[in-house]
Amino acid sequence: MPTCIFNWSGGKDSSLALYHCLQNPELDIRYLVTTINDAADRISMHGVRVELLRIQAERIGIPLFEIRLPEMPGMTEYDAIMKTSLQRFRQEGITHAIYGDIFLEDLKLYREERLAEVGMTGIYPLWKRDTRELINEFFELGFGTVIACTQERLEPFVGKEISPELIAALPADVDVCGENGEFHTFTFKGPIFKKPIGYKTGEKVYREYATPKDTTDSCFSDTPQKAAGFWYCDLLPA
C-alpha cells in the first residue's frame, strides 16, 4: 500500500482529487501538505486564512502539515525548503506525493524531478481529464467552493461561489477549472468533509507581484519581470 502525502491547496481541484483518492483503499494518506505565506499567515497564492485551512483539515480528518515560506522566496530558497520537507516525509517511510494537477506538463515535470531527488513518486488523480467534465463532476458530487483570488481582469468574479451559471459567464479564454492560474478557490462543503465550513466574505484587495521567469509558480521568483495583478477576497470563519 503506497504511503502518501496529499498536496492540499484548499481549493476545488485538490478537493476533487482527494475525493477520488479516498475512494481508493490502496492509498494511505498520512498528511495534507500546504505551503503557507509565513508573513501573511495565509495559503500561498490563494490568500486564504490559515484558520480556515485548519478547519478544512479537521473536517476531512487527515493531519495537516504546514510548510512555511517567506513572502517572496527565490527559486533556490523555495526548492531548499521543499526538499527538506520531502526528505522528512521520506524518512517517515512515505513514498508518494499526490497532486491535483490537470494538464500543465511543465509543472508536472518540475514536481517529478523534485520528487525523484528524494526517492518519491507522484500520483495525479485528475491528470489529462477534460476540465469541463471535472467541474461538472464537482457540482454533481455536491461540492461548494468560492473564488478567493483571480487575475486582475476577472475582478468581478472574486468572492463569488462557483456555480454552473458563473462558469458559463467566464470569458471564453478562461479555463473552467482555472488551471492556467486564472482563479483560485476555497472549498467549503462536499463529500470529503464531516460537515460544511461556514465562512463570510470580507474586503477585496488588489495586489501586484513580479512575474517569475522560468519558474512553475508565481509565489517565488529569482528574476523579477513585469508585474502581474491579482484580486483577493478575504474569507473569514462564520
Image (spheres, grey):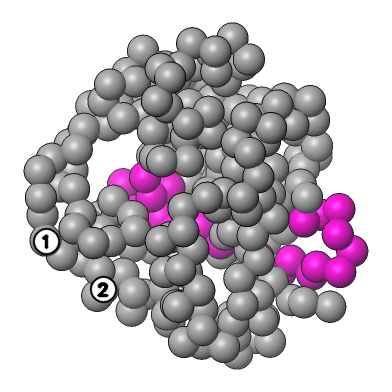
Where residue 48 appears, as percent x and y from the top left, is: 44, 38
Q: Tell me the kind of residue under disc 1.
A: Thr
Where residue 203 appears, as percent x and y from the top left, is: 34, 19
Q: Which mark is residue 77?
A: 2
Is 25 one of the magenta-colored residues? yes
Is 94 one of the magenta-colored residues? no
Residue annotated with mark 1:
223
Q: Residue at x 80, y 30 (%)?
A: 141
Residue 188 appears in view: no
Q: Tell me the kind of residue under disc 2.
A: Glu
Q: Quadrant of residue 12?
A: top right
* Label 1 environment density (alpha carbons within 10 Å; few <14, some 14–19, many ≥20): few
Residue 164 appears in view: yes
Mark 1 vs 2: CB contact within 8 A: no
* Magenta residues, start to end: 21-45
Q: Residue at x 51, y 57 (%)?
A: 34
